[in-house]
């Protein structure tokens, strides 16, 4: 699919696992950096909702999987998934929901500029949960925000994940004890008064990568502010759901999203 759009610098077709979905590698501009992402669009020209897919992890951990975004596109969305700066040939360096949040903001605007796209939903998995909430705060016109196994408190991540502390100290610039403000500015819990979009929280109770406490804190804070929120908790699942259940949740959350469209 060739898109004539000033927000897209380069585009290259990518092999798709679904014959009804086209995949395109996109180069776009984020704060002056050339950043890469992947677009998944159902074949055709009919208008449909946009879906901003914000991946988890960092660098090669938690990469965007073409089959995953094609799965969401098959549910009737035009999906764009930024790789974040410094990945897949893009410029710059990720800093774990610091300045790289701009890559999500620019991706939202890219989706918004596509002629087929109607409302835009924001989805974040794992570390992408923080990115999704921050993007929802930035764009009050977003139709919905979904976090799946999502981080909501960066200080809590530092405390829980001993294996990530070295990386977090490096990219954030220190520990939460020495630089609490750097962790707070990456923690959307403190800014939810400004969130306009309804939120869906999906979390496995046995998740050891991102504890369910992240979901509980997010839901408590949203409810205390009387914001619209739904919580789907799965007592038997970890960070990763079995394939059959995963497909069912994808179908259910897609329906939930479409019900939020204006």
Image (tube, rainbow, N blue to C red):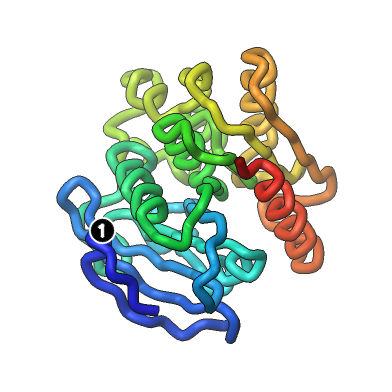
Visible residue check, residue 108: yes
Front-lying residue, 40 or 89: 40
Q: Residues within 10 Å of mark 1 (few under 14, many from 20)?
A: some
Would residue 95 be visible to someone looking at this image? no
Q: Residue at x 44, y 59 (%)?
A: 81
Left or right relative to 163: residue 181: left
Q: Is residue 66 left or right of residue 96?
A: right
Residue indicated by mark 1: 7
Q: Identify the image quadrant of the C terminus.
A: top right
Left/right of residue 135 with respect to residue 196 in the rendered view = left
| Residue 105 x, y percent position in the rendering | 35, 43
Given residues 7 and 231, the one toward you in this image is: 7
Give residue 201's quadrant in the image: top right
Question: Between residues 43 and 82, which one lies in front from this camera angle?
Answer: 43
Report the number of discs.
Answer: 1
Residue located 46% across and 27% down the image: 187
Q: Residue at x 75, y 64 (%)?
A: 247
Tell me the residue at 64%/22% (across/down). Answer: 227
Q: Residue 61, how many percent across, how many down? A: 46, 60
Q: Residue 194 in the image: state x and y as whole percent.
A: 48, 20
In this view, the residue in front, 48 or 251, is: 48
Quadrant, the N terminus: bottom left
Above or below residue 252? Residue 181 is above
């Amino acid at each position: 699919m060739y898109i004539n759009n000033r927000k897209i610098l380069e585009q290259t077709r990518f092999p798709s696992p679904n014959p009804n979905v086209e995949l395109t590698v996109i180069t776009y501009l984020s704060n002056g950096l050339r950043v890469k992402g992947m677009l998944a669009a159902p074949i055709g020209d009919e208008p449909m909702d946009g879906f901003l897919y914000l991946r988890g992890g960092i660098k090669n951990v938690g990469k965007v999987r073409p089959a995953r975004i094609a799965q969401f596109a098959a549910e009737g969305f035009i999906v764009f998934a930024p790789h974040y700066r410094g990945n897949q040939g893009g410029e710059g360096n990720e800093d774990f929901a610091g300045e790289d949040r701009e890559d999500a903001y620019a991706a939202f605007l890219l989706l918004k500029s596509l002629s087929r796209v109607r409302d835009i939903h924001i989805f974040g998995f794992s570390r992408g949960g923080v990115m999704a909430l921050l993007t929802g705060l930035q764009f009050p016109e977003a139709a919905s925000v979904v976090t799946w196994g999502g981080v909501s408190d960066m200080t809590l991540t530092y405390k829980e994940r001993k294996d990530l502390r070295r990386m977090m100290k490096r990219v954030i610039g220190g520990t939460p004890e020495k630089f609490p403000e750097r962790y707070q500015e990456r923690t959307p819990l403190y800014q939810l008064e400004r969130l306009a979009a309804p939120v869906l929280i999906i979390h496995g109770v046995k998740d050891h990568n991102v504890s369910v406490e992240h979901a509980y804190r997010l839901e408590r804070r949203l409810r205390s502010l009387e914001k619209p929120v739904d919580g789907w908790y799965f007592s038997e699942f970890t960070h990763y759901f079995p394939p059959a259940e995963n497909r069912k949740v994808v179908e259910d959350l897609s329906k939930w999203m479409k019900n939020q469209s204006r």
